[in-house]
Image (tube, rainbow, N blue to C red):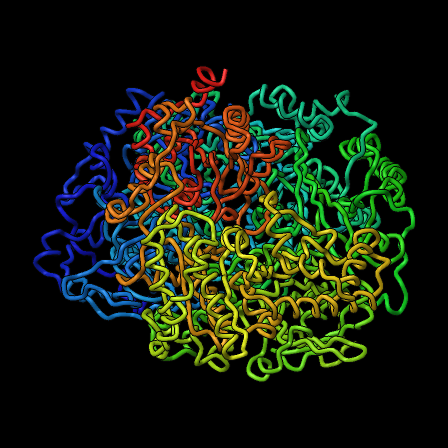
């Protein structure tokens, strides 16, 4: 990549001279983000010249302007603003939270002193063109954002007061990226290849550069190269390849971002190669982090010149230094270290005194200030250590870091030594800093040192005995220092360093020595007047007393135990709080993790006292303590670098180390701050006048720089560990325990304490856990969510004998024991154990351990208290409840839960993820397929490129493309519905690594009312099965107890977790065929996806390895849709659907229809024209007569134009024509009327049902809808109600499932009889009776469908087997076709006899609802109706029902000017109600409500949590109740919203109002009401509303209201009056809503809700 890609180290084009980076005040200090000159863009379009002066510009030159001259004026301006008004202007670093919101973290002095540490940056106009990590100046605005406690806890820098001030970036002081050599990794969309989307989601979308000769190519990205003559030149076009498994990633060189540009400009210079996932992931990480590949040429030359191979330290240098080469010095480092920058020594003196030496490599002797080497070291800031001992990215070249500066064993090296003389009590009585020369005699590693202390009675280590004695002495000194400094915290260190956990004593010795040396150096510098205001310090804020008191109130027991070990305030340190236990409630229990308790017992038995003490005293091992610990903000804050002169002495303190001052001195080889301190120390030692070589402002700048580098490198190293761990998990998943933390109503976070260095806090959305409902417990101290399930859980082993279950089952849903992974102990006994550890009395510790053991709660007590360990539908106690088991599972902060983690690639990088979440010992929830259904079941990567969208004569390509979209959409909907059940202990036979089959007993399924397999067998179509394999259901197979040798890993995780432990193999499959014999169902399936490799132990024997099967059901309509589409090329090649699919015009083979026949019949229709009620005129009559003679017609009707009446007229007349033809030919023909929703079809059915008794009309619902009215036994738990359920008259009159129950036949009587039995006692209905029941239904359905003249059904239902088998469809009418996908529109047309199609719709009304973002991207949401529109489309222009003023309000916004001219108002109305703001002739108004959005974790059918707005709920209910009193009893009202949860809450308050309907926009197509109240739901505080918006922000803030079609549908449902309730300021961010509100404003119809209540309602 480096060799072939010119983007690495290549030249840079010139910058435009007339552009600026951001707003005016920031022009001088931001390392101007532009490269190309505008002149070059005009004059040389094929090549772009590069300016050499910009080729090597670095961050330290940020004050230069484009001409290369120093221009610090702008930076000075920005800093002057802060100095002049520090309360208003803040120096900050830009950050982005988990939700993608920008904030600014204050880094100036007030960050320590003030309560405000973070500023919200809302809106692009406030953020400007800065990036994450940039150092900026922010102006604090007046508004404030409210911050929830959850948000505060998610980010440690949240304001303590519960609100964040808003701010605006007014200038950039320093960029976090090297803009002159910034490579941004992006993906491209083949449909819009010029838009480059960074894989780093915090970055904005980039535009790819274009030149005059290469304007772009569809499906290709323009690639450029850097030539040897410093030019960027067009190279080639690269095709865009969509592959979700291995995404194509482009390397884009950042060019510029001008003020007038909404997006930055970049140039694609290469494509990342396809390679093994780990290498690819690390390559991406290094590019994102801008890791330097090598040292610059000038640095290398300086090294070669100053330090050749012959270099030796001068004798003069020896003469001025302390010769310490004869003393025993040694290093303690990891085994693979090369840069040894610290060594230790200790020498015994008289009277028990000791002379302790901490020797640090004197790097400052070799690296001179302002040299090329120093500039490079400052820029790098620190060394980056790769995993597994790979070559680090060093701050200094290897000649220094691994040779001349490294304190290598046996070599004389220069050092700065801190000598501390201690008395007999190990108290420091004297400190000296000296320049020295040392010779390390031993190179030790942590394991060697730890071995010395494995047995305290003798020295078993291989090290020399005198060295071992020195180590024991150092350990004694370090322990006493540590105890004096932090009390008993020496045993309670919180760390995620696995090496520290394994070798704690060795690490503690080194750590304490370094801490003390750093502290002594800080004291020495601060005690010198020349360095008092210019010393780099590391500070950690001291918590405020009110902050601690509040924490103690929230966690009284936990805080008391924590403060027994680590007091939190100055006067309590060290250890004085041990005796104060009054706040402990001794009646409460203490929660102990079972694994930790077992480890404690083991350590007690083996005598590992150090480990035992740590396990007892460290909060991280105990659920309750760790939750309390994480809720103390001071401990979640990180230490920061500051300049001593920028802070008062009180703010020099490092709280967690309990030191009054602290610096970093001990690692100058790898940290620039330490090198900086070394220079100050050398100056101090040399007693120079005006000793400091740095000004205070320089130290401040370098502290900020190094803080930024520290953060960046920390993120890099954490990400690298994450990637390597994900690579391990990709081969072998791991089962682990995790702590539940930070519970909110919509989710919680998981903290894996054992592996927290590799696994970050995982946010888990409650909606992914498969519960039918999630309820947050209000005012719970820690946070708690209760998950309610109704799930079929069956065990095939129960055929050999039923499972035994306790008969003592409480009434109502059973409760799972959510704390099965913990013990409960008496808090008094645990307190006693803590006391004994603090005293160090081993006998008392043993006695206390026995006391805790006796107090552990018996598991039977948990069972007797109403909780159970496991759930199943097997066994008599639970079987009586029905076909599923109702149970609840609580998730509480502090719980220990069991997970399985695996690895996957996300945007090119490996990442660990939670694959399984355990609810009970045998029931897991697969989060993997719930998070990404498409990846698991659909393989969306087969959607290759937009070339398949081209219309041609290849129906195979058409079906492949649309089939992929339909399958992806179907699986996302199926998983979101959560219609599933579990079969445990299923025997599976694998035929190969891609296919398999399993057998399930017919008796077993029927005995448990598992009817899906019978249904699939009955749906089988022999003609279809001979052509294609099916897509019948989704299967998640989970094999427990799979063993596999762990892969080799360079991570030290094997010591804290068992890598050889068994795991659960999760594999996602698709059922392709189901057959049935007398005894078994055989289910054949294809493997679609698995995150880990195929286990070798899987075989062909059904009994070799049993699995748990989660079957996810699709609806019959969904299965039929996929089946029909896949068979289109083979079975329906000559159908109407095929012709229409491949052409946007009238199908050619249908042009020669016998129109003479229609002309003859038309003359006989005069007698039936008036039988259908409704407004009707000559224009519509002419349109109907014309359409009757056309094989294919499109009718476009504007709102309220009578489109549905025309469709009903056409259906009625065509049915009459069919009757006439049937008399002549003896063949019965039928008309099919289809639509997307029940409401649109019922509207059509209403016209047909009234006044046409001579025709038989039947509405065939899909099976899912039918079973809502007449459920089978297995459906009773899952029965749900529609939000619009008051208009059931037509459903009862025309619904096929109701008609078959009104027949007088024997089958009809049987159906009614079993319906009654199911409703009373479903378990008493036998399997034989259910089979007879289904057979009777099939018989009656066949009779009624065959006799029908007009069949109404959903488009997807039209291809069900019962319709295809029993109909002879000749004509198809599709109403509201704009809400049907292209595939849905084609489905009714596949019937072989169809010769006439009429498609009606309004392109401005709601479009198809698409759940999957992938299918939406590729056009599934674009209806065929819209594609087929042309000038020949018939247009209905007159409207009949809507108030003229309402029409005048909506048409200018949602319809074009041509439509406005065409629509003729045919309405003469009486004056309406008198409360409208603009009078009775303007029946509309907008009520402005600034509410608060809330999310519900419960999902009914969608990809994201539902939203409600409690303020709008209250306002809507109040307005609706008031309006009911104003209207007449005959009139009706509808409350409309886009969000179901919002509607449910409103409906709850409006019970009993018979003339009020509450509905979502998706359920009202084709329906109208007299008065409509629209509640828009979405709302933001005024301060969060952006002035300049982008599509992403609009989508996140307004949701579906961004769609003009949805908005038009919402607002066009009323006849007489319209009331809109919403947030005016937010809605006006959308152009359509802005135009609408402006129109309302002109009519004085925008009113503040509070004013309206005060002036009108009261």
Horizontal side, residue 1412 vs residue 1436: left or right: right
Query: 1349 above or below 575?
Result: below
Residue for point 17% across, 42% down = 65
The residue lying furthest to the bottom in this view is 1026
Q: Position of residue 1418 (x, y in %)?
A: 40, 63
Horizontal side, residue 481 vs residue 1213: left or right: right
Q: Position of residue 369 (x, y in %)?
A: 29, 42
The residue lying furthest to the right in this view is 807
The residue lying furthest to the left in this view is 43
- Residue 130 seen in the current view: no
- Residue 1493 seen in the current view: yes
Examine the image and state in which quarter residue 1469 appears.
Answer: top left
Q: Of residues 1579 and 752, which is closer to you in this image?
A: 1579
Examine the image and state in which quarter residue 730 appears.
Answer: bottom right
Horizontal side, residue 691 vs residue 1042: left or right: left
Examine the image and state in which quarter residue 267 appears.
Answer: bottom left
Q: Position of residue 1618 (x, y in %)?
A: 42, 33
On-image quarter of the N terminus: bottom left
Query: 1352 above or below 848?
Result: below
Q: Of residues 1638 and 891, which is closer to you in this image?
A: 1638
Q: Position of residue 645 (x, y in %)?
A: 38, 24
Number of numbered tags placed on the structure image: 0
Q: Of residues 673 and 656, which is closer to you in this image?
A: 656
Horizontal side, residue 241 vs residue 513: left or right: left
Residue for point 64% across, 76% down = 1020
Q: Of residues 799 and 1123, which is closer to you in this image?
A: 1123
Query: 1173 above or below 1165?
Result: above
């Amino acid at each position: 990549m480096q060799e072939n890609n010119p983007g690495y180290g290549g030249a840079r084009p010139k910058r435009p001279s007339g552009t600026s980076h951001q707003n005016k005040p920031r022009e001088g200090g931001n390392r101007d983000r532009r490269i190309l000159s505008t002149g070059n863009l005009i004059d040389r379009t094929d090549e772009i010249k590069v300016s050499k002066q910009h080729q090597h510009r670095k961050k330290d030159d940020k004050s230069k302007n484009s001409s290369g001259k120093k221009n610090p004026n702008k930076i000075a301006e920005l800093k002057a603003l802060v100095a002049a008004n520090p309360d208003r202007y803040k120096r900050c670093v830009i950050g982005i939270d988990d939700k993608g919101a920008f904030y600014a973290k204050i880094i100036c002095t007030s960050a320590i002193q003030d309560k405000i540490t973070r500023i919200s940056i809302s809106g692009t106009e406030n953020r400007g063109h800065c990036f994450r990590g940039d150092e900026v100046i922010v102006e604090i605005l007046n508004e404030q954002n409210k911050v929830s406690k959850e948000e505060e806890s998610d980010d440690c820098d949240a304001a303590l007061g519960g609100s964040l001030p808003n701010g605006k970036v007014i200038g950039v002081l320093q960029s976090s990226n090297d803009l002159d050599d910034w490579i941004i990794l992006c993906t491209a969309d083949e449909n819009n290849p010029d838009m480059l989307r960074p894989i780093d989601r915090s970055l904005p979308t980039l535009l790819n550069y274009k030149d005059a000769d290469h304007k772009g190519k569809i499906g290709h990205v323009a690639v450029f190269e850097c030539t040897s003559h410093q030019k960027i030149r067009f190279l080639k076009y690269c095709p865009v390849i969509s592959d979700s498994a291995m995404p194509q990633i482009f390397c884009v060189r950042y060019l510029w971002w001008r003020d007038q540009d909404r997006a930055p400009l970049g140039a694609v210079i290469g494509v990342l190669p396809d390679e093994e996932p780990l290498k690819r992931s690390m390559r991406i990480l290094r590019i994102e982090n801008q890791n330097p590949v090598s040292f610059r040429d000038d640095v290398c030359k300086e090294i070669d010149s100053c330090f050749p191979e012959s270099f030796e330290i001068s004798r003069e240098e020896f003469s001025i230094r302390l010769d310490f080469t004869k003393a025993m010095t040694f290093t303690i480092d990891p085994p693979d270290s090369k840069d040894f920058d610290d060594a230790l020594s200790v020498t015994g003196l008289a009277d028990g005194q000791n002379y302790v030496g901490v020797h640090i490599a004197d790097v400052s002797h070799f690296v001179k200030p302002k040299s090329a080497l120093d500039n490079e070291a400052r820029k790098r800031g620190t060394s980056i250590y790769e995993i597994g001992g790979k070559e680090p990215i060093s701050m200094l070249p290897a000649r220094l870091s691994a040779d001349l500066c490294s304190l290598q064993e046996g070599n004389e090296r220069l050092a700065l030594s801190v000598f501390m003389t201690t008395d007999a009590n190990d108290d420091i009585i004297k400190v000296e800093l000296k320049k020295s020369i040392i010779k390390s005699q031993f190179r030790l590693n942590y394991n060697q040192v730890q071995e010395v202390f494995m047995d305290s009675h003798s020295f078993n280590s291989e090290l020399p005995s005198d060295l071992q004695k020195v180590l024991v002495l150092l350990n004694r000194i370090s322990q006493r220092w540590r105890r004096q400094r932090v009390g008993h915290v020496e045993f309670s260190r919180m760390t995620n360093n696995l090496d520290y956990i394994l070798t704690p004593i060795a690490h503690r010795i080194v750590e304490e020595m370094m801490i003390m040396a750093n502290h002594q150096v800080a004291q020495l510098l601060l005690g010198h007047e020349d360095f008092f205001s210019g010393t780099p310090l590391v500070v950690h804020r001291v918590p405020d007393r009110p902050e601690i008191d509040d924490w103690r109130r929230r966690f009284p027991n936990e805080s008391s135990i924590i403060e027994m070990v680590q007091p939190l305030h100055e006067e309590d340190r060290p250890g004085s709080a041990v005796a104060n236990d009054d706040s402990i409630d001794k009646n409460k229990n203490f929660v102990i993790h079972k694994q930790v308790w077992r480890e404690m017992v083991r350590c007690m038995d083996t005598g590992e006292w150090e480990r035992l003490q740590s396990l007892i005293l460290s909060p991280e091992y105990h659920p309750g303590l760790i939750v309390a610990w994480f809720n103390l903000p001071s401990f979640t804050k990180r230490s920061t670098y500051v300049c001593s002169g920028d802070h008062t002495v009180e703010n020099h303190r490092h709280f967690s180390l309990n030191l009054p001052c602290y610096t970093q001195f001990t690692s100058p080889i790898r940290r620039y701050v330490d090198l900086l301190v070394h220079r100050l120390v050398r100056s101090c030692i040399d007693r120079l006048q005006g000793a400091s070589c740095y000004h205070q402002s320089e130290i401040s700048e370098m502290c900020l720089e190094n803080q930024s580098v520290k953060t960046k490198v920390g993120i890099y190293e954490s990400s690298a560990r994450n990637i390597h761990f994900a690579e391990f998990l990709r081969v072998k998943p791991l089962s682990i325990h995790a702590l539940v933390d930070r519970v909110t109503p919509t989710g919680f976070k998981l903290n894996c304490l054992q592996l927290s260095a590799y696994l970050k806090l995982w946010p888990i959305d409650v909606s992914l856990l498969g519960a039918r409902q999630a309820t947050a417990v209000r005012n719970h101290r820690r946070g708690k969510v209760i998950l309610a399930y109704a799930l079929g859980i069956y065990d095939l082993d129960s055929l050999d004998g039923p499972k035994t279950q306790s008969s003592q089952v409480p009434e109502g849903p059973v409760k799972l024991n959510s704390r099965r992974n913990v013990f409960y102990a008496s808090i008094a006994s645990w307190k006693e154990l803590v006391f004994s550890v603090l005293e160090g009395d081993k006998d008392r510790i043993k006695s206390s351990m026995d006391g805790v053991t006796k107090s552990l709660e018996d598991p039977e007590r948990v069972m007797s208290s109403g909780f159970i360990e496991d759930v199943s539908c097997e066994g008599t106690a639970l079987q009586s409840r029905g076909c599923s088991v109702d149970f609840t599972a609580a998730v509480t902060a502090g719980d220990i839960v069991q997970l399985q983690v695996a690895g996957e690639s996300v945007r090119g990088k490996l990442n660990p993820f939670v694959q399984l979440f355990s609810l009970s010992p045998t029931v897991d929830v697969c989060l993997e397929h719930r998070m990404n259904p498409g990846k698991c079941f659909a393989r969306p990567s087969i959607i290759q490129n937009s070339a398949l969208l081209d219309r041609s004569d290849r129906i195979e390509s058409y079906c492949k493309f649309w089939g992929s979209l339909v399958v992806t959409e179907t699986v996302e909907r199926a998983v979101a519905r959560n219609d599933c059940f579990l079969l445990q202990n299923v025997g599976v036979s694998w035929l190969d690594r891609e296919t398999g089959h399993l057998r399930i007993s017919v008796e077993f399924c029927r005995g448990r009312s598992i009817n899906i397999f019978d249904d699939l067998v009955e749906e089988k179509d022999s003609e279809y099965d001979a052509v294609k394999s099916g897509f019948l259901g989704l299967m998640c197979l989970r094999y427990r107890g799979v063993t596999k040798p762990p892969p080799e890993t360079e991570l030290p995780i094997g010591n804290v977790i068992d890598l050889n432990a068994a795991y659960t193999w999760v594999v996602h499959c698709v059922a392709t065929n189901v057959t049935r014999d007398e005894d078994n169902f055989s289910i054949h399936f294809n493997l679609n996806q698995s995150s880990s490799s195929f286990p070798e132990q899987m075989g062909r024997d059904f009994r070799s390895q049993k699995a748990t099967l989660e079957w996810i059901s699709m609806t019959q309509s969904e299965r039929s849709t996929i089946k029909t589409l896949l068979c289109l090329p083979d079975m329906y090649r000559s159908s109407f659907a095929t012709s229409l699919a491949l052409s946007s015009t009238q199908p050619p083979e249908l042009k020669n229809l016998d129109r003479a026949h229609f002309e003859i019949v038309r003359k006989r229709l005069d007698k039936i024209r008036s039988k259908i009620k409704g407004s009707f005129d000559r224009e519509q009559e002419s349109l109907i007569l014309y359409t009757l003679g056309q094989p294919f017609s499109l009718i476009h009707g504007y709102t309220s134009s009578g489109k549905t009446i025309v469709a009903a007229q056409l259906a009625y007349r065509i049915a009459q024509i069919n009757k006439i033809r049937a008399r002549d030919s003896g063949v019965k023909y039928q008309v099919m009327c289809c639509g997307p929703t029940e409401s649109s079809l019922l509207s059509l059915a209403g016209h047909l049902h009234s006044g046409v008794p001579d025709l038989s009309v039947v509405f065939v619902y899909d099976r899912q809808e039918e079973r809502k009215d007449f459920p089978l036994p297995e459906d009773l738990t899952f029965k749900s109600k529609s939000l619009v359920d008051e208009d059931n008259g037509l459903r009862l009159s025309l619904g096929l499932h109701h008609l078959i129950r009104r027949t007088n036949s024997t089958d009809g009587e049987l159906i009614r009889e079993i319906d009654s039995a199911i409703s009373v006692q479903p378990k008493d209905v036998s399997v034989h009776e259910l089979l007879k029941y289904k057979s009777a239904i099939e018989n009656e359905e066949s009779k009624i469908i065959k006799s029908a003249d007009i069949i109404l059904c959903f488009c997807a239902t039209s291809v069900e087997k019962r319709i295809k088998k029993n109909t002879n469809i000749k004509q198809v009418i599709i109403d509201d076709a704009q809400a049907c996908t292209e595939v849905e529109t084609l489905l009714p047309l596949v019937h072989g006899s169809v010769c006439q199609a009429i498609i009606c719709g309004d392109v401005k009304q709601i479009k198809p609802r698409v759940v999957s973002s992938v299918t939406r991207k590729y056009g599934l949401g674009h209806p065929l109706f819209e594609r087929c529109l042309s000038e020949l489309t018939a247009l209905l222009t007159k409207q009949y029902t809507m108030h003229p003023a309402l029409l005048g309000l909506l048409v200018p916004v949602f319809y074009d000017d041509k439509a406005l001219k065409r629509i003729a108002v045919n309405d003469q109305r009486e004056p309406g109600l008198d409360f409208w703001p603009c009078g009775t002739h303007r029946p509309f108004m907008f009520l402005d409500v600034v509410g608060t959005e809330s999310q519900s974790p419960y999902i009914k059918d969608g990809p994201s949590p539902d939203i409600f707005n409690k303020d709008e709920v209250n306002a809507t209910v109040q307005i609706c109740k008031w309006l009911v009193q104003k209207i007449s009893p005959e009139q009706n009202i509808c409350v409309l919203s886009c969000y179901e949860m919002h509607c449910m809450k409103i409906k709850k308050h409006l019970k009993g109002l018979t003339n009020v309907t509450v509905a979502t926009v998706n359920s009202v197509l084709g329906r109208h009401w007299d008065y409509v109240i629209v509640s828009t739901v979405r709302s933001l505080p005024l301060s969060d509303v952006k002035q300049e918006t982008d599509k992403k922000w609009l989508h996140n803030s307004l949701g579906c209201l961004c769609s003009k079609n949805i908005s038009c549908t919402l607002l066009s449902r009323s006849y007489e009056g319209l009331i809109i309730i919403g947030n005016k300021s937010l809605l006006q961010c959308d152009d359509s809503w802005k135009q609408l509100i402006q129109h309302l404003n002109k009519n004085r119809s925008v009113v503040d809700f509070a004013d309206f209540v005060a002036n009108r309602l009261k």
